[in-house]
Image (cartoon, coloured by chain):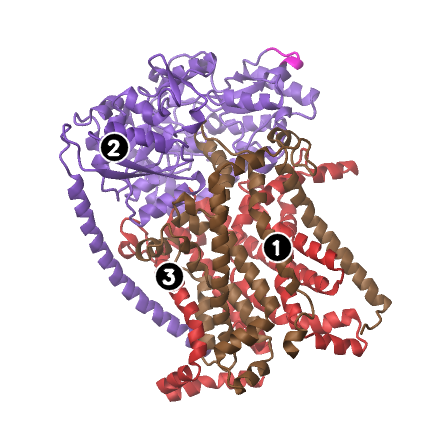
Amino acid sequence: MKGKFRKAALPVIALLLMLSTVLAACSSNESAGNTNSGTKQEESQDTDTNAAQAPDPATLKFMFFGDKPTDLDKVLAEFEKRTKDTLNTKIEFDFVPGAEFRQKQLLAMSTGESFDLTFDAPWATLYNHLSLGYYQPLDKYFNNDEYPGLKNAFPAEMMESNKINGHIYTIPFQTSYADPFIIGIRKDVREQLGLPPVKTMDDFKNYLEAVKTQLPDYVPMVIGGRGIFRLGLPEEKGRNDIRLATIKPESFTGGIPFSVSISPDGKKVLGAATIGDPESAFADFPAPFNTHDSIYGHFGTRVEYRTYTNEDPLSKQATDALDPIKQGAIETTISNLSQDRLKLQKLKPDADYEPFFYTSDDIRDMKPGAIRTTFIANNSAVVPASSKNVDRTMKFLDWMFSNRENHALIELGIEGEHWIADGDSGFQTTDKSPDYKFPGYEMTWNPTLSRLNTSNEPEVIKYVEYAQDTSSYYQVPLSGFVFDSKPVATEIAKINPKLQQTYDILMTGLEPNWKPFAEKSNKEWRDLGLEKVREEVLKQVQAYLDAGGK
Amino acid sequence: MERTISYQSQPQKIKKMGKNSFIREIRKNHLLYLLTLPGILLIFVFAYLPIFGIVIAFQDFRPIEGVFGSPFVGFENFRFFIESKEVYRVVMNTVFLNVLFILFTTVVSVSLAVMFSEIKLKKFKVITQTLATLPHFLSWTVVAMIVAVYLPYQGGVVNQILNAFGIESVAFYNEAAYWPFLLVFIKVWHAAGFGSIVYLATISGINPEIYESASMDGATRWRKIWHITLPLLKPTIILLLLLALGGIFYGDFGMIYAIVGKNALLYPTTDVIDTYVYRALTEFSNISMSSAIGLFQSFVGFILVLTVNQITRKYSPDSALY
Amino acid sequence: MEVKESSGDRLLLILMYAGIAVFALVCLIPFVTVLSSSLTTESSIQQFGFQMFPKAFSLEAYKLLLQNDTIYKSYGVTIFVTVVGTVLAMLVTCAMAYPLSLRHLKYRNHITFYVFFTMLFHGGLVSSYILITKYLGMTDSIWVLIIPSLLNPFNMFLMRNFFKSIDESLAESAKIDGANEIYIMFRIMIPISMPAIAAISLFYALAFWNKWFEAMLYIRNENLFPLQYLIKRILDSADFSRELAQNVNIFEYTTPTLTTRLAATIVTIGPIIFLYPFLQKYFVKGLLIGAVKG
C-alpha cells in the first residue's frame, strides 16, 4: 500500500522540484526586467518642474474603496483641461468595492503592482502595513516651499501629530477630529408618554423604563454588537499621567485595550492593565484610576441597561429585522442624525428624533476642550512603496490643496452643476449632487479647504463647526505612540479571537455577572500570552518616552 | 479481486522493464494519453505552477521581498493556532459539523434521487425537482436574511408559532445549543435537492433490463430499491464521500459567517477553524499565518483521503478514487 | 407490459409523493418570500419584514437595478462565459475522464493522483495572482473567467465514475471493428452517458454562471464584469458599510436598499433556473434502453 502511494507521489514531487527551479530562474529574469523599465519610467518623469513649461505627460493610478462617482470622468476631463500646461497629468481611479478593498490592495502591493496613491488609516491596516514596509515616507513634501499648497493646507503642528515613528507616511484627511456620539430619542414617543426632554442619564433611564412598561411592543433602545457604544466611559481629561483604553477601538496597543500609566514627570512607564486584570495591576495607577472598575466598570453599566435593549443584539440580521418605528431610541452621531430622521419619517411622517448627548454635557454645551482626541486623523492616504511616481502624485495633491477652487473641483465637482457656493466656505447641494459624490475621506477632506454643507439644519451646522474647531479638543497622553505588533504577532493572534468574544458579550451587557466573567476571560488570555504582550507594551512605551515622546 | 491482484503485481514489472515499458505503454495507448493531455496541461499551469506559494506558510512573508526573498521561519506561523487553547474546540466543531453535514445531505440527497426516479407523474416530477434545486441558487447572504425572518426573539416566525401554542419565545440567537441542529437543517435544505442530481443521473444510467427481470421475479418496489438501485449508487456515494472527506477540516466559512456572523454567544458550537482564523488574523492581514492554516487543513484532509482510499481499495476497488 | 402493483408498493409510492411534496414546499416558501419581498417597497419591508405576499406592490427595486446599462452587458458576458466555458470544459473533462476510466490504461492512477493532489493543495492567492497577472498577462481578458476553470477535478472524477460503470465490452467490440479510441469516446461512450453529461454540464454551467472571484481579482474593465460579480458588489456594499460604521463615521457611504438586494438575487438566478427543466429529460430511469441496445 505504502509503495503505491510513493509510486504515485514521486513523479509529482519531482515535477514540483523541477518547477520551482524553473520558476526561480524566471522570476530573477523578471525582476531584472522590472528594474529596467522602472529606471526608464523614472527618467521620463524626473523632469524639470519648471512652471512655465508643461512637464512630460504622466498617468497616476489611485486605488480607493467605494463606488465610483457617476460623473467622475466629466470632472477629470475638466481637471485635465485646467492643468494641461501645468501638471499634464492623467489620473486613473480604481474604485474597489469596500468589501474587496483590503484583499485587492494587499495583493497589488504583495505582487509589486505599481500604483501611486491608496487609502489606509489607523482604524484599518495602516500600522500593520507600515511595519511591513508597504508605504513610502513623505517627509520631504510637507512644510516645503516647493509644495506651497501642501504647506498651507497641512500646518506643521498637524503633520507633527500624524507622524509615525518620527516620519510622515500619511496625508491626513479630516474636517474634524470627531463626530460626537449621541442617542437619538424618539421625540414623538417621549411626548406621547408625557415625559420632559431627556437631559441627564436619569432622564434617559426614566424614558427607557416608561417605553418598556407602557409600550410593550417597542424596543426601548436598539443596539448592535457594540452596545451603547460610549456608555459610561471614564475620561482622562486634563491628565498627563495616564492613557485610558476603555474599549477595544480605543486600544493603541495592537487591538488589546491596555490602559497605561506613566510617572507624573512623563519619564517612566508605571504599568499597563486591561479588562479583567486583578486589582494589583491597577495599584500603581494614579487616583482615581487605581481600581479596575474605575476604568472598566462601564461594563457593569451596560448590564444595567441590558433590560432595555433588544433580545439578540449580536445577530445583525435579527437587529435589522426589527421594525424601525417601534424603537424608543437609537445610537447615532451628530452628522448622521438628519439622515436617520429622514429614514424614519419616510416610514412615519410625524415621527422625529432629538439628540441626547450621553457622553458629556460639555460637548452638548459646546464648551472648549471637551472632546477627547489624539489629533491623529481618522482617515488618510498613503503612497505604496511600489509607486514610481511619488513626485508627480504629490505635485497633483499640492495643486489640489493650493486653493479652494481646485479643491472644490475634486471634492464637490463642477461648480454650478454639482454644487453651488454659499458664501466663502459653504456650499449647497443641487439635484445633480448625487452624480458626484466623491469620498472626501479618502483624498480631499481638509479643515481649511473643505466647504461646509449649509443645506443641513442650523443645529447640526453649529455642532459641525464646533467639532471643526481645534480648541474644542483636549489631547490624551501618548498620542503619538504607535505600537509595533510584529514582535508579539503570534500572541496577539492567539488572544484576539478569545478577547473579541468576551468583549462583544461585555459590550452588549449580555453577561449579568460581568466581572467574574471578565476575570475568567482574562486568565484565559494570560494562558495565551497576555503577559508577553504586556511586557512588549511597557517596553515600547518606555522606549517612546525615552525618545522624548509625550 | 482478480483485478486487484494483477494491479498489485505491476510495480515489479515496471522496475524490470524500466524505460522500455513506459515507451511501449505510451505507444500502445498514445491516443488515450493524448486525450488526457489538455487536462494535464491545464492543471500543470493553473495548479502546479503556482504551488510554490505553499512556502509562504513557512516564511515571514514580506510582500516587498516576495516569495523568493522572504526569510524562512520554520513552523513559527503555525504556532498561533497550535498553541491556542481554542484549537481543540474549534477543530472538534469543524469536524463534527462537517460530519453531520455530509451524513445528512448524502442521506437526503440519495433518498430524494430514489424517490424522484420512482414517481411517474410527469408534471409533478418536473415541478418538484426544480423546486428542490431552488435553495442552492440563493447565496448565503440571502439565506441569512431568510433565517432572520424565522428565528429572531422579537417577531420571528418560529417564536410566533410557539407563542400561538402557549410556549414561551426562544432566543435562538443567544443560545448555542440549538445551532448544530439549525445549521444542519439549513445545510440540508440548501444542498440536498441539488445534490440529488448526481444520484439521479446515476440511476438514469442503470440498465432498465435489470429492473425488468427483477419485476418478473416478483420483487417489490422496496426490494428493487434496496437490492438494485442502492448497490449501483454505491460507487458514486463512496466517491463523493471520499472527496468530501478531503475537505472535512475546512469549515463552511461562507455559510457560517453569513448566518452566525460575529455572534460570540454562538461560538461554543458554531466556531469552526475558518471563522476562528478569520477572527484571529482579520486585524493583521498576515498572509503567512493564514496560508499555514490552509496547509494544515489540506494536509490532514489529504492524509485522511489517502487512508480511507486504501481501505476502500481493499473492500470495494471500483469505488476507490485511484 | 405492466406488472400489477401490490398494495405495499402503492403505499410506498404514496409516501414518496408525500415526501417529495413536503421537501419541495420547504424549498418553495423561502423562495417565494424572497421573490415577493423584492416586489414590495422598502418601507414596507423595513416595517413588516419579509412577506409571503407583498403588502405594497412595487417594481421600484427592479427599475433601479435595470436602469443601469452595465447589467445588460454583464448578462452578455455571463452568457458567453457560461456557454463557451461549459462546452470547452465538457470536452476537456470527458477527454480526461474517459481514459482514466479504462482499467487497462497503465498510468491512470498516476494521472488520477496528479489531479487529486490539486484538489487539496494549492499555492494560495498570491502565487496564482502573480502567475495570471504577470506571466500569463490575463488581466482584463474574458478568458481568465474560462480557461483556468476548464477542468474541475470533482466533476472529472464524477464523469470518470460514470464511464467506469459502462460495460467495457461495448468499447471492446467497437475496437475489434477497427474504431480508434477517440471515435469510441465521441460516438459510443458519450451518447450512452447522456444523464451524466447532462448532470456534469449543469454543474459546469452553474459554476461559470456564478463566477465572480476571478472577476474580482483580474477584471477592471466594467464592460467585462460578469453578472454575479456586479450583483455581489451590490450585496456586499451593504454589509461593508455596516462594518465601516463600527470603525468610523462616514455618513456619505450610500447603501443599496434591502429590496434592491433581493431583486438582484432574483435577477441573477432567474435564467439559470430554466436550464434545469430543460436538462431534466435526461434524468429519467430507463432512458438509455435504446442507446444500449442499438
SS at mark 2?
Answer: loop
Name the chain letter of the residue that bears numbered label 3: B
Q: Nearer the viewer, residue B195 or A508?
A: B195
Label 3–label 1 contact, CB within 8 A: no
* Three-letter code for the amino acid on which mark 1 is drawn: Ala
Q: Which chain is purple?
A: A
Q: Which residue is mark 2?
A: A168
Look at the numbered disc 3 and give the secondary structure of its residue. helix
Q: Main secondary structure of the magenta part?
A: loop
Q: Nearer the viewer, mark 1 or mark 2?
A: 1
- Would you say residue C180 is visible in this rendering? yes
- Which residue is labeled 3 in the image? B51
- Does the magenta run of residues contain A528? no
| Chain part drawn in magenta | A191-196
Query: What's under tag 3, amino acid-wise?
Result: Ile
Residue drawn at x 20%, y 30% is A85
The picture places residue A487, in percent across and down from the top left corner, at 33, 45
The chain coloured red is: B
